[in-house]
Amino acid sequence: MADGAADDYPRRGGCVSFSPNDRISIFGALRPGSGQSVTRAVVATYSLDLVALLGLVLTLGGNPEAEFENSPLSLVKAFDGIRGRLRVLHQVGRIVAPRAHRSILPLLDTMVEAVPANERTQSWHPKVALVRYEGEGVEWRFWIGSRNLTGSRDLDAGLLLVTSRDKAARPVTDVGQLARGLLVEGGFSSSELDELDSARWLAPPGVSVRRLLWRRPGGTTSFIGSPLLERAEAASAVSPFIDRTGLKEVLRAGSPSVTLLTTDMAAGKCAPLAGIAFRTGTSPEPEATVSVAQQTEDKAAEFIEPPPAGVHAKLIALTKGRKSAVMIGSANLTTRGLLGPNAEAVAILDVVDETLAGSLHEFVQSGFEFEPARVNEAAAEREESQRQLDERIALLIECDLMLEYADDGLFLIIGEGAGAALAAARFEAAPFVEADAWLVLEKSARRLQLLRGSVVPSEQTSLVTFRATSLADPNIQRTWVLSLPVSGLDPDRRDRALLTRYVGASRFRDWLRSQLDGLDATAGQRWSDAPSGRVADGTSSVPDMFTLETMLSAWARDPAGFERRTSGMMAMLDSFREAFEELPEEDERDAALADLVEVRPFLQAVHDAIHGGA
């Protein structure tokens, strides 16, 4: 959820609002402006859907207005533009991926990094994004909230800050400290950190940032060390997960009575509690996967549609007269969320926008008054069984696991001491590119062959899929993806091989032209559309692409970019040759290789002219 219309949102900053007309996606908040390009992006999330991550790549590096409707060559452009610049930090064991699009998703495995928090005691749970843009000048955007990078349709809340020279912009030194500490795995450079330290940030009108608070896994920083607003006249809170200790912390925020919006199941565990008026809404589904079809069929979609399925926001709001204080972020109103040891991030805001504060209090009041009779006991039992299975999964994740690509196949290597974990539930593994090829992990397993025979570079990845099933109830099950340490994988070669296979023979000339003059002949197609499977008919247009006039025009528009692209094109030619040699149809194979033979001398001449024959 965010305040303001999509067109001017990033330039104004944005904040939580609970008016249905003021909704906007994280993608909309982070979308580059005209003439901007992303030079650094670090995102923290608890759970991660790889298709949602692909959508973020398309937004940051492709055609930002198109999002999931980007063309095939826009996908290639997006990946080339974002590779090495985007890092997503997630809770280990919380990657999900739908069955579709698994042939292209391995491109993302170098962009993700698991934070190894053991969920039996603590979790990596912050939801923040810090992105640097270059254009006419340097701009940073900082987003903090409750939204995971998944396909969830739940009701979330977030705040966006944008660096600005506007008189209303103010220093927020906590952003730089958060980048150094919470996001240390993001690897910000010293010059980037200096920029953050000296930046002035624009917040929404009527909103100012008092503090940003965060903690790493294992930390015990209290987020409500003192009242947020003394003697508040109205107090509301939202959290789908609660416990009695966490709610007692909420009562220290500045009011002896708080109206809380949560779920029936959570309320059933804590009510009654003096000072808390329980109201309830629909339970969230924070790990729902993205449906590309849904996103492309709804032309107005900005990645949050359709209407929210449940309450997933986490916040506290207190009002006294015209002033309000709001705590917004990732922390549930639980012991682990408010006191630790979960890794979390929250913003403490001072708000004088009465409409914004009023809409929040009204939203909380719109929930149903809690009735214990509505608690679904069967659902509560399933939740407890799922929690017990998650603890067994955590045991396996703690073991040393790795992948090995060898001449005779792909192997999962299981470290010593895994026997106890493997005995606690039924565990299976499958190669990421073959989602149904499940193999049981026996208690004594130490080396499991996932694929037989040499694995071609375009199908290699550090990703592997796991499934756990409860021994007590086979209906209790969870599937997840891990990115594991891997030997025998050359990521650069894999990326070239995968992209050339994706472009294919039928799009080769289109790709070539897009590299030379920036024209996208696949515009109007979607990245998820299958290629035609045949080389374009007619006389080759290769000589027309490499005329002196065409080359000089392309170089003049962007000399540095043109020189960079020609080097990349030369590196891709060998990968195209390998891909074309594997084509099963002889006519298609011969035509594709003939195109390649015709291209190479032209491109080599251009490359040598630019780079001096190097």
Image: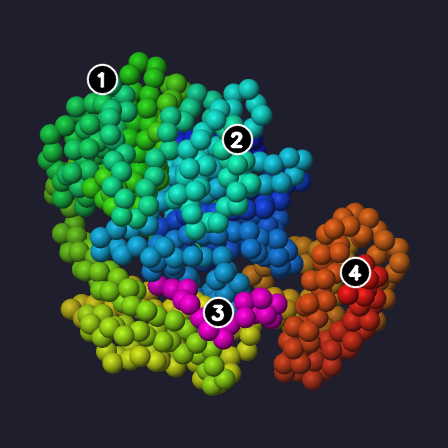
Q: CA distance from mark 2 to mark 4?
A: 39 Å
- Residue type pointed to by label 1: Arg
Q: Which residue is mark 4?
A: 611
* Circle 3 crowding by C-alpha within 10 Å: few under 14, some 14–19, many from 20: many
- Camera-side mark, 2 or 1: 2
* Circle 1 crowding by C-alpha within 10 Å: few under 14, some 14–19, many from 20: some
Nearer to us in this view, 539 or 549: 549
Q: CA distance from mark 2 to mark 1?
A: 34 Å
Residue at the extreme top: 321
Q: Which residue is mark 1?
A: 231
Q: Which residue is mark 2?
A: 199
- Residue type pointed to by label 2: Ala
User: Helix, strand, or loop for circle 2?
Assistant: loop
Chain-order first, disc 2 or disc 1: 2
Chain-order first, disc 1 or disc 4: 1
Q: Is residue 483 magenta?
A: yes
* Magenta stretch bounds: 480-498
The residue at the point 58 percent across, 53 percent down is: 82
Nearer to us in this view, 533 or 508: 508
* Circle 2 crowding by C-alpha within 10 Å: few under 14, some 14–19, many from 20: many
